[in-house]
Image: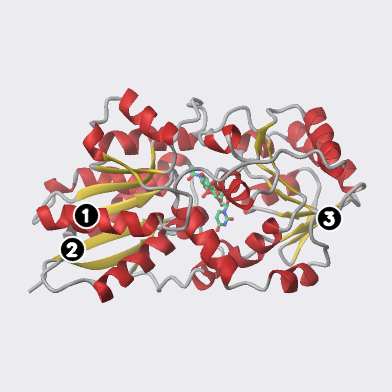
Amino acid sequence: MAKRLKIIWVAGARPNFVKIAPIWKAMLDYNSSVDAGRPMFEPILVHTGQHYDVNMSDVFFKDLELPKPHYYLGVGSGTHAEQTAKVMIEFEKVLGKECPDMVGVVGDVNSTLACALATVKSYALPGGKNPLLIHVEAGLRSGNKLMPEEINRIVTDAISDILFTTEESGNKNLVREGIPKEKIYFVGNVMIDSLFQILEKTDVNKVLRRFEVKALNFGLVSLHRPSNVDRPKRLKELMKTLDDIGRDVPLLFPVHPRTRKRLEMIGWKTTNGVTKSKWHGIRTLSPLSYKDFVALMSKAAFVITDSGGIQEETTALGIPCLTLRETTERPVTVEIGTNKLLGNTLETLRKEVKDILAGKSKKGKIPPLWDGNAAKRIVKILAEIGDDR
Ligand code: UD1
C-alpha cells in the first residue's frame, strides 16, 4: 500500500487562491501518474475567510478551478490581532481533527502567519504529531517592518521546515537570517504557473471588447496598500493625478474593498459595487475576476500598482509596471523585469506614463524558473520528503 501524505493547504486572501491553484492541480496530476509504492497525496483545502466577498473569493475559486474548501473558517475582517487570533483558534481545531503530515501556507497575509503559528504549536494538541510546515514564496523581504506583510514573512520563515523560494534574493535573505540551506528550495514562482494556465484558457480579445478598450491603449490601476489609500490627503492627491493621466489615456481601476471604503470617506459614491467617479479620466470598477484582470493586464500599455503579485505578473508578461512604493520585496522584477519603483512622488508617475506613451518603456527579461512549472517542482520535492519520513 502506498504511503498517504495528508497535507492541509491554507488559503485566506485573494492572492493565496492564485498560488494554491497550480499546487493543487500538480498534486492531483502526481497522484494519477505516480508509480505504485510511492507516496500519494491526500490534500485538504482550508479557506480562512479573510477575504469573503463573492468577487474577492468565490469568483477566484471558479476561475482557478479550485474545489470547494473542506473547511471554511469564516473569520472575516478585524484588527490585525483579532483577525490573526480568530484564524489561529479556528485552525487549531482543524489541526486537532485532521492530524496532517504537513501544512502548506503561501505568501504573506495574516492567515499565512496565523496558520503557521498554530501548526508549529500543534504538537501540544491531543494526538498531534507535529506536522512539517511548508512556506511557499519564502524569503521575500521589503526591509520595511511597517508593512504588516513583512512581519508575517519574517515570522513564518523563521518557523517553517520547508521553504520554497521564487527568486535568488529570497535564498540570500533566508541564509542571512540563519535558516539552514538544506531547508531552502529554489523552485520558481507558482503565481506565474497560474498566470500562464489562465491565459491559455482566456479569449483576451473578447475581454478587451467587453471593457471597451483597445490593446496597448489603456492603463490598468490596482491600489490598496495602507501607505497609498489610508490617508485622505494622499488618496485625494493620488486620485487627482490618476484623473489627469486618464485624460491622456483611458484608465481602468478595479477597486479593492479597502480602497472603496477609503474613497467613500473622501466623497466618492458607490452604487451596486461600482464606484462612480466624480472626475472623468478614470473608469472605476468593482474588483474583477482573475480571468478578466489577467486578460486586461496582458494587453495594457502599463499597470500602476502597489500590489506584490502584480509586480511579478507584469514582469512575466513584459508589460511596464509602475509601482507606487518605496521598496519592493521582489527585487528581481526591478533588476531584470519591467517594474519601476516610483516611491511616493506623484510627479514621477506623470512623467513615467508620458514616457511610456511616447514609446520609451522599460524592457525586461523573465526571471529564472518563472516558466510555469514551479508547482510541479514543489510537489516532486514534497513527495520525496514524505517518502523519507
Ligand atoms: C490583504 C493582505 C495583503 C494582500 C491583500 C490582497 C494582510 C495583512 N494583507 O490586505 O497582503 O495584498 O489582502 O487583496 O493580510 N474586505 C471586504 N471584503 C473582503 C475582504 C476584505 O470588504 O472580501 C475589507 C475588510 O473589511 C477590511 C479591508 O477590506 O476592512 C481589508 O481587508 P484585509 O483582508 O484585512 O486586508 P487587505 O487590505 O485586503
The image's mark for residue 102 is 1
Front disc: 3 or 1:
3
Q: Which residue is mark 2?
A: 5
Q: Kindly state the secondary structure of the residue where label 1 is placed.
A: strand
Q: Amino acid under label 3?
A: Asn
- In the image, 254: left or right of 37? right
Instruction: Point out the tag, 3 or 1, that comes first from the N-terminus.
Output: 1
Depth check: give the residue in front, 93 or 346. 346
Q: Measured from the top left, where is residue 261 in percent x and y?
A: 68, 49
Quadrant in the picture for the N terminus: bottom left
Q: Quadrant of residue 70?
A: bottom left
Q: Amino acid under label 2?
A: Leu
Q: Quadrant of residue 42?
A: bottom left
Q: Measured from the top left, where is residue 195 in percent x and y?
A: 54, 59
| Residue 346 in view | yes
On screen, residue 114 above or below 60: above
On screen, residue 98 above or below 35: above
- In the image, 192: left or right of 231? left
- In the image, 94: left or right of 165? left
The image's mark for residue 217 is 3
